[in-house]
Amino acid sequence: MKLNWKLRFKNKATLAAIAATVILLAQQLGFKLPDNVSDVVNTGLTLLVLLGVVSDPTTQGIGDSERAMTYTEPK
């Protein structure tokens, strides 16, 4: 599985999904967060997953295409 990580980290939606996942992981590890923060993060992550932010639906499988691997800026 090859991914163009530089390009993915330039995408704001991907960064939002990563941040939400980190907060969710902290919650599951037992760190106490205010209830409203936990609920907002859980809902936000669910919406991002539903929109396909976490995986790229335009490529076959879960990796990036050869063309996407050559990008330095999102197209």
Image (cartoon, helix red, strand yellow):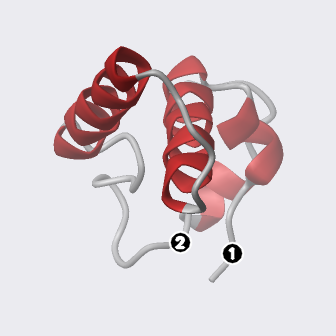
Percent position (x, y) of residue 57? 28, 54
Q: Residue at x 81, y 33 (%)?
A: 72
Q: Which residue is more in the foreground, 28 or 50?
A: 28
Q: Residue at x 23, y 30 (%)?
A: 43
Q: Residue at x 69, y 75 (%)?
A: 2
Query: Residue 66 sits in which quadrant?
Result: bottom right
Q: Secondary structure at mark 1?
A: loop
Q: Is residue 29 above or below residue 54?
A: below
**Mark identifier at residue 53:** none
Callout 1–callout 2 Cβ contact below 8 Å: yes
Amino acid residing under circle 2: Gly
Q: Secondary structure at mark 2?
A: loop
Percent position (x, y) of residue 44? 31, 26
**Mark identifier at residue 2:** 1
Q: Residue at x 61, y 25 (%)?
A: 11
Query: Residue 64 sits in which quadrant?
Result: bottom right
**Mark identifier at residue 63:** 2
Amino acid residing under circle 1: Lys
Query: Residue 7 sits in which quadrant?
Result: top right
